[in-house]
Image (tube, coloured by chain):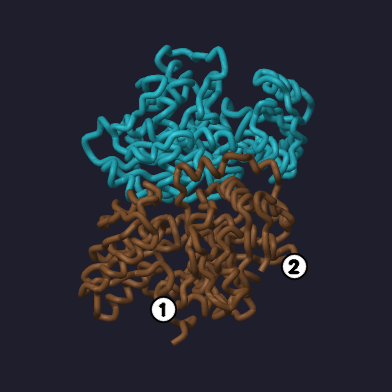
Chain colours: A brown, B cyan
Amino acid sequence: MAITFQNIADSLTRISDKIYQTPIVSSALLNAWLGHEIYFKAENLQKVGAFKARGACNVIAKLIESGNPPNKVVAHSSGNHAQAVAWAANKFNIPATIYIPSFASAIKIQATKSYGAEVILMDSRQGVEDAAREHSQQEGVYWIPPYDHEDIICGQGTVAIEAMDQLSLIPDAVFVPCGGGGLLSGVNIAAKGINPEIKVFGAEPLNANDAAESLRKGAIHRLLESPKTIADGVMTLAIGEINFEYLKQTDGILEVNEDTIVYWTQWLSQLLKLQIEPTSAMTMGAVCQYLQNQKSKQRILVVLTGGNIAPEKHRQIWEKNWLEVLPSLAIELLGDNKAGHS
Amino acid sequence: MAITFQNIADSLTRISDKIYQTPIVSSALLNAWLGHEIYFKAENLQKVGAFKARGACNVIAKLIESGNPPNKVVAHSSGNHAQAVAWAANKFNIPATIYIPSFASAIKIQATKSYGAEVILMDSRQGVEDAAREHSQQEGVYWIPPYDHEDIICGQGTVAIEAMDQLSLIPDAVFVPCGGGGLLSGVNIAAKGINPEIKVFGAEPLNANDAAESLRKGAIHRLLESPKTIADGVMTLAIGEINFEYLKQTDGILEVNEDTIVYWTQWLSQLLKLQIEPTSAMTMGAVCQYLQNQKSKQRILVVLTGGNIAPEKHRQIWEKNWLEVLPSLAIELLGDNKAGHS
C-alpha cells in the first residue's frame, strides 16, 4: 500500500504533543539579494537538534497505538538517528540499544547516552547495521531503521504539513537534503497532497550523489566507499528500496559541490544566527540552481534539517572566509570538483 | 532626574512595533546538569543580531515623538551599535553617518553599509569618537552614543520587561554582560521595578574588568589600552558616567576568564543550536559562580545579547574542543589567568 497524504497527516496528529513546532525564519537581506522569498523551517531547533525526532517518534507511537508495544527498540546510526531513537524510546519509557560506529563524533555518542540508551560501539558501518538487525530477531525487540521504513517516511513528512500550516501560503517549491531519502519521500507526498503544483527537490553533495545517480540510471546506485563530504548527515551509501519508488515522484535531486556547501553553512549561520549543519545549508546550493531558471518571483520553503556540528567540523567550516563573497543566484563555487546538475 | 521603571515601560511601548519579540529558550539537559532552571532570552535573533537595536531605536523614536526629529544621526562603534544605529535610522528614514575604526571586522562594516548608512573608517578608537562628537556640532545632527545616554539605557532595559512578561514568572536573578554598562543599568532598573527582590548581576571578562574595578574603587576605572579578550562586545575602556551611578545599584559584576568564555560559547551553541557571541556566552561563567553559593533551586534569566561572530573568531572559538568537559556548577577553567570574584 502506497503512503498517502492522510498517513502523514495522521502521523502529525500522533506525534505533535511530543515534538516541538519549530519556528520558520527568514532573512530580509538574503531575500533582497536573491530577489525571491525563502522561508527556513528551523528543525535544528527540534528535539535532539534534528528532524529525525519526528520519524523515530512516529514509529514507536504507532507501535504503541496498534496495541503491540515493543519491549525494546534497537537502531544503528553514526548521527542524528541514534539520538532520535534514544530520545523517542526514553519519551515512551522503552529501553533502547543503539549501535554506533566508533568513528562517530564523541559528542553524538555522548548525547545518545544522555537520553538513557545503551550504546554499543563497533568498528564498521556494516557492522552496526548487521548487529542491529540481528538483535531485532529477539522476541519483543523492534528495529527502527534510519530511513527505509514507511512510518519513518511518514514521520519525516510531517515537517512539510506543519510548515505550510504555519506559513499560511503555498510555496512554489520545497527543498530538503537527501541522504537515505526518507525526508525527501515524505515531504514530496505531503507537499503534493496539499497542492500537486508544488515542486519538491532534494539536495545532495556532488561527492555523495548516489541518489541523483540512481534516478539517472533508474536503479539504486550504491557507493563503494564512504564518500568524502562535509555534509555528514547524508553520507549514506545508497538510498532505501522503499524510498527509491517515492524519490522517482519528486522533481529531481540537485548536486552541490563542497565549497558551495561550506559557503552556505557560513552564510546561513551569519544571516539567521542559528547553528546549522552543513547538510542543511547545502540545500541553498540547490535552491540557487533552481532559481537561476525562474522568470517570476518564487516562494521557497527550505527545511533546515539539523544543528549538530562536531568541534572539528566547526574548524573545517571556518578555515576560509566566504563571508566576503555576497550571496547571489549565480553563487556556485568551484573547488576540487564542478557542480553537476540532474 | 533618575531613570524610573515607568521610563523603561514607556520605551518598550515606543519601540515594540519596530523590534522583534525574541524567543526565550532553554536546555533540559543543561538544567538537569546544573540542578537549576536557566531561561535564555535570545537577543541574538533581534534585528541586526543584537539587543543594541532596542536602544538605538528608542533614542530616535523619542526624538521624533518630542517633535524634534534630527536631520541626521551620527554614531561611532566598532561593533553592534554601528549596525543598530544604521538600522534604526533607516527604519525612520533619517540619514546616518557611522564612524568605525578600520580594524573592525569587515562583516560588521558591510552590514552597517547594507542598512544604507554612510560609513567613515578611521584609524583609532578615540578618532571615531572625536569625529562623531564633532560632526554632531552641526545643526540638526544628533549623536547617538553607544551607552552613556538615558534613552539608550531605557531602550536596552526593555529586554527585561519583555522577557519577564513572556516567562510569566519572577526569576531569582538576571544576568547580562557589562561593557559600557547601558544594558546592565537598564535591566537592573526594570527588574527591580517589577520586583525589588530580583538580583541583577553583570558579567565581565577578567581581562577587561574595568566595571568591576570601578565598583571596587568607587570611581570610574579606565583601562589604558584595548583589552585582550575574545568577548569583543565588551572591550570598552571605561563605563559611562551616567551608567556608573546605576551600576552601583546592581548586585555586582562577576569576572570570567578567557577559557571559561570560550567554553560556554561552545556549549551554548551546542545545546541551544543558536549562533551566540562569546560576549553573551560569558554570562554563564558568572551564573555558575553565583549558583555555587545557592542552597535552593534558582530560576535564572540570561540575556543572550548577540550573535555576530567574525570568521576569524569562529576559528579561535573552536581551536580546542571543550565539549568533552560536561557543564557543572564548578566549571571555571584556568587558562592564562585565574578567575576573580567581585
Q: Which mark is residue A294?
A: 2
Assess whether mark 1 and mark 2 are in contact (beta carbons under 8 angstroms). Answer: no
**Nearer to us in this view, A59 or B166:** A59
**Nearer to us in this view, B78 or B91:** B78
Letter of the chain that mark 1 sits on in the rendering: A
Amino acid found under the numbered disc labelled 2: Gln
From the viewer's perspective, is residue A21 above or below residue B15? below
In-image side of B89 versus B222 (left or right): right
Upstream in the sequence, badge 2 or badge 1? 1
Identified at 53% across, 14% down, the residue is B222
**Nearer to us in this view, A276 or B174:** A276
List x then y, in percent, for residue A195. Answer: 59, 79
| Quadrant housing residue B138 | top right
In-image side of B40 versus A72 (left or right): right
From the viewer's perspective, is residue B37 above or below residue A68? above
Q: Which mark is residue A10?
A: 1
Q: Residues within 10 Å of mark 2 (few under 14, many from 20)?
A: few
Count of numbered labels shown in the rendering: 2
Instruction: Please identify the quadrant where the C terminus of chain B is shown.
Output: top left
Q: Which mark is residue B274?
A: none
Nearer mark to the viewer, of 2 and 1: 2
